[in-house]
Amino acid sequence: MATDTSGVDRLTETVRALQNGLTGLPLSTAMDNTEAWQQEFLQSGIPGLQDIAREIGTLQSLLTAGKLNGPAIGSSLSLLGTQTNQYAFQAPAEQQAPLRSLGDLLLRLASDLQSSKSK
């Protein structure tokens, strides 16, 4: 992520969008958002961000599959949440809190999705 304000603003917007749950976000919006993050992370040259970008690609594939696989999507979200929280420790100071919020939110959404499969 860039250290400019637009990167922090986009991060904040992403957190806000996900706070309404996975179904509160249109798939096209989710795909546009994840594509923008993926490209930025792949080009960053930072291994932790490149790992996140690869998992975003996995999530995109799962979201565009003919039949949605809830457990697999939950697993991908969980990995993304963990990776995001790990990267937050080395991120610029102004990005650390929003990254931790995003990581925690992804973990919660993953848990919600994975627990709903057993109901």
Image (tube, grey):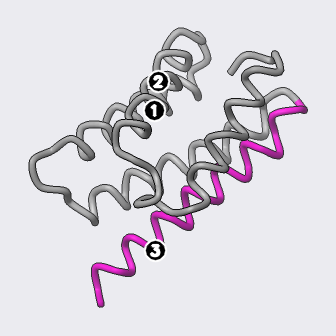
* Residue at the spot of label 3: 112
Amino acid type of the residue that numbered disc 3 sits on in the rendered structure: Asp
Residue 18, position in %: x, y? 56, 53
* Residue at the spot of label 2: 38
Callout 3: helix, strand or loop? helix
Q: CA distance from mark 2 to mark 3?
A: 24 Å
**Farthest residue, direction right:** 93
Specify whether 83 is left or right of 98: left
Residue 103, position in %: x, y? 63, 51
The majority secondary structure of the magenta stretch comes to helix
Q: Residue at x 65, y 59 (%)?
A: 104
Mark 3, residues whose alpha carbon is within 10 Å: few (<14), some, or many (≥20)? some
Q: CA distance from mark 3 to mark 1?
A: 20 Å
Residue 9, label in figure? none
Q: Are marks 2 and 1 in contact (CB under 8 Å)?
A: yes
- Residues drawn in magenta: 93-119
How many numbered tags mark residues here? Answer: 3
The image quarter in which residue 31 lies: top left
Callout 1: helix, strand or loop? helix
Q: Is residue 103 magenta?
A: yes
Amino acid type of the residue that numbered disc 2 sits on in the rendered structure: Gln
Callout 2: helix, strand or loop? helix
Does residue 55 appear in this view? Answer: no
Which numbered disc flags the more N-terminal residue, 2 or 3? Answer: 2
Question: Quadrant of the image for the C terminus?
Answer: bottom left
Q: Are marks 3 and 1 in contact (CB under 8 Å)?
A: no
Q: Relative to residue 48, is residue 97 depicted above or below?
A: below
